[in-house]
Image (spheres, coloured by chain):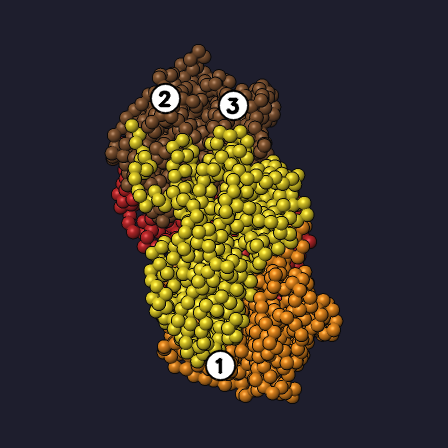
Chain colours: A orange, B yellow, C brown, D red
Amino acid sequence: MNLTHPFFDADGDKLREECGIFGVIGAKDAASITALGLHALQHRGQEACGIVSVDGADFYARRGIGHVAQVFSGPAMFAELPGTMASGHVRYSTTGGQGLRNVQPLHADLARGAFSIAHNGNISNAMALKRELVNKGSIFQSTSDTEVIIHLIATSRYPTLLDKFVDALRMVEGAYSLICTTPKRMVACRDPLGIRPLVMGKMGDATIFASETVALDVIGADFVREVEPGEIVEVRIDGRVTSHRPFGNHAARPCIFEHVYFSRPDSVTGDRSIYEVRKQIGVELAKETPVEADLVIPVPDSGVPAAIGYAQQSGIPFELGIIRSHYVGRTFIQPEDGARHADVKRKHNANRALVAGKRIVLIDDSIVRGTTSLKIVQMMRDAGAAEVHMRVASPPTNNSCFYGVDTPERSKLLAARMDIQGMAEFIHADSLAFVSIDGLYRAVGEAKRDAAKPSYCDACFTGDYPTRLTDLIEKESPDQLSLAVDELT
Amino acid sequence: MNLTHPFFDADGDKLREECGIFGVIGAKDAASITALGLHALQHRGQEACGIVSVDGADFYARRGIGHVAQVFSGPAMFAELPGTMASGHVRYSTTGGQGLRNVQPLHADLARGAFSIAHNGNISNAMALKRELVNKGSIFQSTSDTEVIIHLIATSRYPTLLDKFVDALRMVEGAYSLICTTPKRMVACRDPLGIRPLVMGKMGDATIFASETVALDVIGADFVREVEPGEIVEVRIDGRVTSHRPFGNHAARPCIFEHVYFSRPDSVTGDRSIYEVRKQIGVELAKETPVEADLVIPVPDSGVPAAIGYAQQSGIPFELGIIRSHYVGRTFIQPEDGARHADVKRKHNANRALVAGKRIVLIDDSIVRGTTSLKIVQMMRDAGAAEVHMRVASPPTNNSCFYGVDTPERSKLLAARMDIQGMAEFIHADSLAFVSIDGLYRAVGEAKRDAAKPSYCDACFTGDYPTRLTDLIEKESPDQLSLAVDELT
Amino acid sequence: MNLTHPFFDADGDKLREECGIFGVIGAKDAASITALGLHALQHRGQEACGIVSVDGADFYARRGIGHVAQVFSGPAMFAELPGTMASGHVRYSTTGGQGLRNVQPLHADLARGAFSIAHNGNISNAMALKRELVNKGSIFQSTSDTEVIIHLIATSRYPTLLDKFVDALRMVEGAYSLICTTPKRMVACRDPLGIRPLVMGKMGDATIFASETVALDVIGADFVREVEPGEIVEVRIDGRVTSHRPFGNHAARPCIFEHVYFSRPDSVTGDRSIYEVRKQIGVELAKETPVEADLVIPVPDSGVPAAIGYAQQSGIPFELGIIRSHYVGRTFIQPEDGARHADVKRKHNANRALVAGKRIVLIDDSIVRGTTSLKIVQMMRDAGAAEVHMRVASPPTNNSCFYGVDTPERSKLLAARMDIQGMAEFIHADSLAFVSIDGLYRAVGEAKRDAAKPSYCDACFTGDYPTRLTDLIEKESPDQLSLAVDELT
Amino acid sequence: MNLTHPFFDADGDKLREECGIFGVIGAKDAASITALGLHALQHRGQEACGIVSVDGADFYARRGIGHVAQVFSGPAMFAELPGTMASGHVRYSTTGGQGLRNVQPLHADLARGAFSIAHNGNISNAMALKRELVNKGSIFQSTSDTEVIIHLIATSRYPTLLDKFVDALRMVEGAYSLICTTPKRMVACRDPLGIRPLVMGKMGDATIFASETVALDVIGADFVREVEPGEIVEVRIDGRVTSHRPFGNHAARPCIFEHVYFSRPDSVTGDRSIYEVRKQIGVELAKETPVEADLVIPVPDSGVPAAIGYAQQSGIPFELGIIRSHYVGRTFIQPEDGARHADVKRKHNANRALVAGKRIVLIDDSIVRGTTSLKIVQMMRDAGAAEVHMRVASPPTNNSCFYGVDTPERSKLLAARMDIQGMAEFIHADSLAFVSIDGLYRAVGEAKRDAAKPSYCDACFTGDYPTRLTDLIEKESPDQLSLAVDELT
């Protein structure tokens, strides 16, 4: 069953993880292992990808628009990526149409040698830092906030590359998991709150870093541990591993939405699989907001585990009332007449014979703008459903993310615009309920959310942002900071 | 849930439908409706597709290698396919590497005017007919057996195009569903046994033909009826419909494998959905070969409906023990070391936390060569499953198909090489069972298979072929039929 | 010095040869020899090219849009064209936008075996023959008149391929030089009047056919003789050569415009080079229409040899008063303002310092529509020329060609619209003169044109067409011959 | 007649100008005017080109591999390059295979605003400057020495962009003609010795800069004057022109090889055309080294003007004894046997009928490695020439250029390896002579070369380099300057 999120979401009705990263050091075929690892992380970024390999001296790169299996598709390609170290990146849309320039890993030649960097996250003071760097003579080639880190390293006065790296990260605020490669070392690190994930694995003598454990499974590596919040792990080409903690200790605040939607169900965090957590959210949901119905129907594919949980808890049979097509492309053309609702039917089709005359519980993972929910509920009614009850496996999403997730602006979020009753009416459901924030924390294994010291970043549900948001503050208070215009006199 | 079969099956371990066809007459935007319809039939042929439109006088064509959403992807494209009639085709690999030449619909300019033709099926005397036509001066441009029909029409002595068409089909043996377009008419027909499917729908004034009902759903059309075995339906551009039956009456023998695997679960034949039939096969399987176990796990995605049926009948919980990735491409490259079994893991990954220590029933739709089953069973064992019992939702596949389905030669079919016990050992399962042929007939609504007069073509399970197989017989008894070689004297 | 005609003539102000052909049998690397030969014939057709090779059994083909050096550009390409026989074709625009379908050599699989054919010329009853063939069931794939010959061969009742070939050519009227390949033979032939050229050469054991001798030079082969008008030369793969003359004897009428413009100056016909003939035309022109002037200036590049002849005969110095750029592409974009006459200047630029204040004689090879002459004369005046006298190295072109040369329709030919005085005024020249038809015949070595029995086809100058023009006659007397439209009843 | 140098010179037997530049400010359609201007400069760089346009605020760029007419070929393309200012660049091979990264104009966003830069020349201390910049934190994106100038500007402490620009150029040594664009200004400048050319023109209100006058001709602009050595010309968007001379006065040393080979014959420097100079070199050559012969034959195309001069001075007839093909591509494939010398014949073919039995004088513009001369002399002998005397329209080329011309290293230059007698034997000529250095200076209008104060850079003939060559000196005395390698500790 496909529980990864497969397609560009044309409705903009899902939140989108912006990146996945992977690195390996000490392995023959490092580049093809990286391709395989990125492939397993494809759900984290489907629009572009890149791999940089290193042979102990030189760097080799290939970046492209498209899926990993398209961009990296032949032995010749890997022959051009030699070396026992490689790192890679998958990403969503290269904002600003700059095409390949923004596709990572980024690479730079510095005085102390070359290095490359792959980044998952978002730097919340990138604009402010960029302004300063440009004023001192740095020339930017991309619009990626990752390039800010590179220029901070290049202009740092510290003597060694590791010191420069730490110096650069001290200036940075926000969320970042990074994999950095030099000719003889790989350095992986995670921001002090550990907002974005990063795990470490082992396969023979090789060390691996990846956004999720599923990338370890797919290449056949063993999970070692998570890279800890604020930790810098340095791996030498001879296999020696050193851990640095230059930023002191902070309580971790990993992103809770990874459990709800981003991560693959077969990934593991802590000691439980994402699949289990999602099924458990379904169980909590069934306990919190039961309903009398004939069938539990998942909105495919991300609603499936919660639907199984809901069905097992409630005793209502789990059935496939909606069939999802594999073949949805993003640029598909619509006939102008005749074929009403063709766009949603192209992706989802009702299993009419099953649904007709039945009371159904629809299970989805989240509601963002509400546009898809509206269409799905209507499709069920058109197929003859007697009642349609919607149950959502996350609390209402009513705040934007500034940590590397592409969220619509707040005013477009359905939950920011109306209350639950209004939402139910908007999507034409007979009833609508969301799991509570405490229910969600129970599903991940806590008693409830500790408001004073929450264990996760849950800002999208609560508005409780764990870092300062410099660029946002400046943008909302525009002042004399505009870039000086060209004056040649 | 994605129950369509999404990817090229690298193991060659599924049978593959070779084509899907679609036609519409009397609709504005006929070409884009056709693209949408073909898109819904994409699972029937994923390697190439084509659309021919007609504006009452001229023909416009576009054909390409790739999915419908890739080949037909912009408004400009449809502007080049004007007219109120269009027909289209999706297909598997263009055998012989002839590239676009074999991509349908094929088109020809005859003395009586131009026409195009889209074909699903296989002509079992194509080689013999081609030899004769070439001897009389016909020049073939493709290796497609469909071109045989075109030359038979071109050289027929009958006066009208319809008469020529009937004259041509009389010479043809095998399976065919055809959609033929002339400047002012659309003609759809099905071979006398109705081996391959073809349905007829209505949307406003427009008439639609398609391989499966799901294509009607997706465009928003209503199902009217199946085109009957041996029937030729002629639709004029003004909407008038005429039915011709030049071949007399035969008992129908539609392909039963459409129920098992080819058709989309949301398609309907007779009055039941394919999903229901498949769930019912799971029910029959649970009755015929029960097993004590902790979890019922489908081999995704085609095993899901039968697994739900098996779980509901047996009371054993349905769980997702295998996670399937959306992103498998066919040319993906494998690291040469380290990553053992990466190919199967790239597609399927075990949900370890769930499976470990459990007795599981694996449900798959069929076993062809057995290579995938072997890997999946091993993956379950590697993930810690205590026992692995395989249950298969079709009888043993031990004969090749000559009616438009790509089957390995007989000697490669696992069920033709060994008995069930041998197969169980081959795939390392603790037990293995197939649904019986009578169980399968029960699932489609009959009491059992009537050996004297079976209601379906089930030759792949029984070897009982409903037509003569001329080319096969000639091939197996080679004689003096070889093509004359070039002798210029 | 580049005396080949290099670019697409955007003004349509040159006649264009429509094709060049080349074949070799008995040579290792036959395909790459063919590419080299076609390259030397590139001036005869610059828009598309193709090569078919044969390895004694199978045919291998590659065709493409573009120059030979673009379409055939790597060793891998030639590895896919194995065998000791190959034939090739260069051509102008594939009329009708049918793209690659019309690119030759064409290929067909007949009952007697496969063959390919490359054609230079034009069949003047192609439409009439095609109509008949279609009525009998032939299906055409291209709009090329060459395909008519193929279908005539395919449907011939004669037993051997050579007999079929002769049978087909008997029905054909017009101009053709053909190179035909079967698995074991190469057959070259020329129409009974020998309108289009074809020569035969030898290199070791290999036999070569080509449109011009320059192709023999470039590959290092020796010239043997011309293929004679009406001759069919058959070469077996073992090297045996047989000559057939099935059409009796006719007086030859080769195209005289080959001397004026089409052929490369380094090609040889009879025993003199084209360069010599063209220089001699300049000499005749200087004798017939002398003028007092300071400089003889060629319109580059095709006017150069005649200008040298004119300068040597008149004693007026030869100078480069117009510089031609190498880099004119056809799709180049023009600024909308500012740059007046940019299009002609892009190709030709005046050598101002040389021309200013001088009386000049401009020498060009021919005037077709007059548009280029008009611009060139004006350019000389803008550069300060005191007087501009135009001398043309061919008689006035006032009839269309129907033998394989792309001519504007008659009403567009300047010489068909006005007399010489009118033409002089149209192009703003101080004087204008053309070589006389007898002067042209003197330059090719005859005393004068024998009106009763001319030795060349000179229809473009005289209107004296040496064959019947069936299609033209039918087109000008349209009758009930229109193709029957589609009627399905 | 094509006197521009048309093709990649596969033998490496010509020196190659590395760039041409063009800019226009104050014109509607600035980008398409720039394309036309670059097209006229195509002979200065045929491998890649780029245009940047500015609309008073934003920059728009397009760069590509290939000829101008290929890279800029449709109205849509120019619609994407709006604005009344544009600059462009044509270049030879992007050294280092960095593809598009090195294609100019380069662009950068600095603190004081964005600008772009197009450069013709070579900076002879680029490596040294780059090392320093990287040590201070600059990150280079290309291997182009032009980027050094950009980083010098970006890191300059001066307040205005013009001051930064002057500050940067003060640090630079070598040859440069630059066209720099800011949102509201265009700045053109030439190095203090004026080694590389740059002219200024006017068309209505628009100001134009270009490498040669031919670009002005082609767009219909008037020549105003040369940009003077060491001058910075600043043009505001309102048309005001200001000249700056921050580097004091130097005696000019323009490249004399522009007259011999690089420039187009229809370009003008001083008050004489390049064509006249070249003809005059032929005259000097005939005076210095006469020979008894029957024909003067140019090596096409660059030898033509000198051959006309030689013929006029000597009275020996000028004839086209070698025909050059237009269609030579660089990747053309050679048959492995049979076709001896096919590569040279593909480009040049002997006019046998003319040459046989004659004593000929061959005129070429220069001899670099001697490989082409060797083949051409042999071709003349194979065609039956009785005697072959080679005369060369430049002095022996025996030193490398470090100012923007691609020269083989010194050890590959024929004239650096042997004396004239040795060279004559090497190329198998009956006699060989070069014009003297004083003869060359006479042809450009001086009495003779003033060794104390030569008026031109003639280092390729004399070894007298007019600037310091820092990078060369460092390379030849390698010391501890190597880049620090990556050390992360």
CA separation, marks 2 and 1? 86 Å
Q: Residue A223, relative to residue A92: is it above or below?
A: below
CA separation, marks 3 and 1? 82 Å
Give the number of the mark in front: 3 or 2.
Answer: 3
| Sequence-first tag of 3 and 2 | 2
CA separation, marks 3 and 2? 22 Å
List the residue tagged with mark 1.
A226
Q: Chain of mark 3?
A: C
Image point (50%, 82%), residue name: A271
Residue C382 placed where, x, y %? 59, 34
Of C236 and A137, the residue lying toward us: C236
Q: Quadrant of residue C341?
A: top right
Q: Tag 1, which secondary structure?
A: strand
List the residue tagged with mark 3.
C471
Amino acid on which the number 2 mark rests in the picture: Gly
Which disc, if any, is residue C230? 2
Q: Tag 2, which secondary structure?
A: loop
Q: Quadrant of residue D187?
A: bottom right
Discs 2, 1 touching: Cβ within 8 Å: no
Q: Tag 3, which secondary structure?
A: helix
Dots 2 and 1 on the same chain: no
Dots 3 and 1 on the same chain: no
Residue C159 placed where, x, y %? 33, 27
Q: Which residue lies most toward the top here?
A: C452
Residue D104 placed where, x, y %? 52, 56
Image point (44%, 69%), residue name: B289
Of B44 and A463, the residue lying toward us: B44
Image point (53%, 33%), residue name: B163
Amino acid on which the number 1 mark rests in the picture: Glu
Of A203 and A55, the residue lying toward us: A203
Q: Chain of mark 1?
A: A
